Amino acid sequence: MKGAERVRDLSESVIRQMTRKAKKHGAINLSQGYPEYPTHPFLIEEAKKAINSGLNQYSVTWGIEELRKKIAEKLSDFNDLEYDPEYEITVTCGSSEAIMSTILGLVEEDDEVLIYQPFYENYVPAVSMASGRPKFTTIDKDLKIDPEEIKENVDENTKAMILNTPHNPTGKVFQKDELNFIRDICIDEDILLITDEIYEKIIYAGEHISPASLKGLRERTVTIGGFSKVYSVTGWRVGYVASPKELMKPIRKAHDYTTVCAPTPFQKASLKALALPDDYYEEVLDYYRKGRDIVYEELKKTKMEPLMPEGAYYMLANIEKYGMDDKELADHLVKEKGVATVPGTSFFDCGGEDIVRFCFSQDIDTLHEAMERIRG
């Protein structure tokens, strides 16, 4: 099946479907990752200033120079990574476009790409649109990976592996022993590593380690990040890619012909985000931790069995005791209880019928109301 045929064969985003159902039924939307932590007023003012000052046209395709330099500084300070902002950093139209441009630029027809399931639903369509072939390995319910399964799914046709840490939807934070194993596999089998680190500042247990910082991985790793989640600006569409120059060349070509550039005034405002003090991140983390604890404790009072996440702001819950599959229960919750979730099968190539996903990035009062509706 060629790329165009694969695109036509793709299913519509289940998450966006559930958002529309939430609006239709007047439900609280715990399906899509809308962060309700207030956008910092400094960022809003900076965006207004940028617009009012006339920064309303295309920027340099790779992103405004000042922002690329600041991203390089942030990567050095926080991620222990060194990149040349002139050739090795590209500002993208959100991390979703960063993922798409990376895969379009690096994956060729029939290349295999290993994906950890449950997965963020954009990964598989991106591989299919590049005419690649997704393969899968599973994170189990104890947030463990299976080294033997990973080895079995890697062969001479494997071009790349996509790694999301902290992980959506499980909340897993990959730790050093696991990342060292992944590094060894990538080096031994000559595999590229694409890392999605959009939730790197939202970690409750463990620590964030950028895989490219491990010895031997930088030259074969593409690191993806962005501003949407931790700064509550999902509508700004500002993300970035960092990689060695030779990998960046085809990524930049895909980026150029896909979106030209990220929104200029929001690129400018993102500079202010990188200047926020450390206590901002502490407050954000405390906010989401409270939401996590509320949803976890309240779901335990139902027939569901929630899985405590280590990072990000999503929670999976086992629903086997309800006698319904994931789609049936998700429909029941949105129509009868007024709460939208995501059916688990949307995160799996095969499986997920026994789980649904909750997003707890909403306001604390909203989460209390949602849990009351479910228990009612």
Image (tube, grey):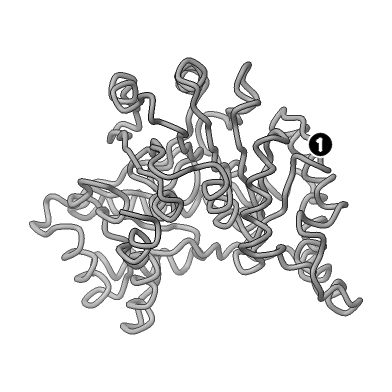
The quadrant holding residue 96 is: bottom right
In the rendered image, residue 110, in percent from the top left (x then y), is placed at: 38, 42
In the rendered image, residue 136, in percent from the top left (x then y), is placed at: 31, 37
Quadrant the N terminus occupies? bottom left
362 left or right of 230 in image: left
Label 1 SS:
loop
Give the tally of numbered discs. Answer: 1
Residue at x 83% of width, y 43% of height = 86
Question: Is 292 situated above or below 167?
Answer: below
Residue at x 75% of width, y 43% of height = 278
Question: Is 57 situated above or below 121?
Answer: below
- Give, as a three-letter code, the residue at label 1: Asp
3 left or right of 355 in image: right
In the rendered image, residue 169, in percent from the top left (x then y), is placed at: 39, 48
81 left or right of 358 in image: right
Residue at x 64% of width, y 45% of height = 250
Which of 170/147 is in front?
A: 147
Which of 257/174 is in front?
A: 257
In the rendered image, residue 54, in percent from the top left (x then y), is placed at: 89, 77
Residue sitting at the far left: 323
Which of 345/305 is in front?
A: 345
Q: Name the residue under label 1.
A: 84
85 left or right of 313 in image: right
Label 1: few (<14), some or many (≥20) within 10 Å?
some
Question: Is 191 situated above or below 296?
Answer: above
Residue sitting at the far right: 53
Quadrant the C terminus occupies? bottom left
The quadrant holding residue 263 is: bottom right
Question: Is 38 situated above or below 346?
Answer: below
